[in-house]
Image (spheres, rainbow, N blue to C red):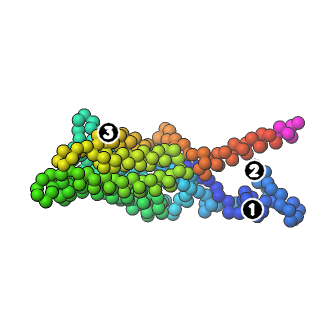
Amino acid sequence: MSAQQPIVVANGGSDATTSQGMDHANGAKAPVPRKPYDYGGNPLARLPTGETVLLPAFGGDFQPGLYRQSDNSKKFANPAPLGLSAFALTTFVLSLINMSTRGLTAPNIVVGAAFAYGGLVQLLAGMWEMAIGNTFGATALSSYGGFWIGTAIILTPGGFQIISDLTTESDGTVNEVPFLTSFAFYLFGWFIFTSLLLICTLKSTVAFFLLFFTLDLAFLFLALGYLLHDGTGKDASPHPVFIKTGGGFGILAAFLAWYNALAGIADPTNSFFLIPVAHFPWSAKGRERRAKVDNDAARAEQGEIKQS
């Protein structure tokens, strides 16, 4: 796990916004607000313990907001990089096919990765996220693991007869439109689900938000590509412009997933550098940094006043 700087949340104490968090001069009823840099020197002030320490949002841990490190997380390795890597590789391969890279358009090769890596391994990572108490990570990784298993079932040639049953009319003629429309509905459902997760990343990091933003656009354009298909009957095919656009966003999502995975793996014990993740300025970590800057400026100003 990448080294995280904790954010201390005091329960009451000197930095609370109510009158309970203010100093009272000589027992007077009128509260005297403290300066943001003045902690009062109260020998009876409550000191933050491990129970009050929160870690900031971090894509490497698949955490979109402030979180406490659970006791179980000390017993398990961080499962987020494994799930992110499984998602990234499978998405990368299918997105290259969607972009018709080197003329390849048949997605058969992705079935194995979708079953084993993007499906099973990512699903297991989601279950381990549940074991360490990460609801967001468990929901996202388990769901996308199910997505890849479901997609592999649909694309398996011959085995489940899903495509052939949808494309074969009662009179034996071939019509691709029912399958294209059905698969579009399937992708629209995942677009909606990803949009819900995207909302939960708005207070996290730029890298984590961009992962879900690009993935959301990939699902949207792929769904439109299958819905607004070209041709009719047996000649119907997904709209190439939408499919290639969706593939492009899928490539971006894959690399962002790998980026977040590396951020979760790299730490001072195994890497010469840590991966920057760029917290949003309105996030808890961003507010903490602004408060630190304000405190430093206030200390400098007070020092100048004393010298004068």
Give the structural element (helix, strand or loop) at label 3: helix
**Disc 3 residue crowd, few under 14, some 14–19, many 20+, Cα 10 Å:** some
Residue of label 2: 36
Chain-order first, disc 2 or disc 1: 1
Q: Which mark is residue 121?
A: none
Q: Look at 22% across and 44% down and name the residue there.
A: 231
Q: Look at 17% across and 58% down and name the residue there.
A: 165
Give the structural element (helix, strand or loop) at label 1: loop
Residue 126, visible in the rendered structure:
yes
Callout 2, which amino acid? Pro
- Looking at the picture, how far across and down is residue 57, in whole percent? 54, 52
Residue of label 3: 241
- Look at the image and give the residue range highlighted in magenta: 303-308
Point out the image quarter for the C terminus. Answer: top right
Q: Look at 83% across and 57% down and name the residue there.
A: 32
- Residue nearest the observer in this picture, 54 or 154: 154
Q: Look at 50% across and 54% down and name the residue there.
A: 199
Callout 1, which amino acid? Thr
Q: Main secondary structure of the magenta part?
A: helix
- Left/right placement of residue 135 relative to residue 151 reads right
**Disc 2 residue crowd, few under 14, some 14–19, many 20+, Cα 10 Å:** some
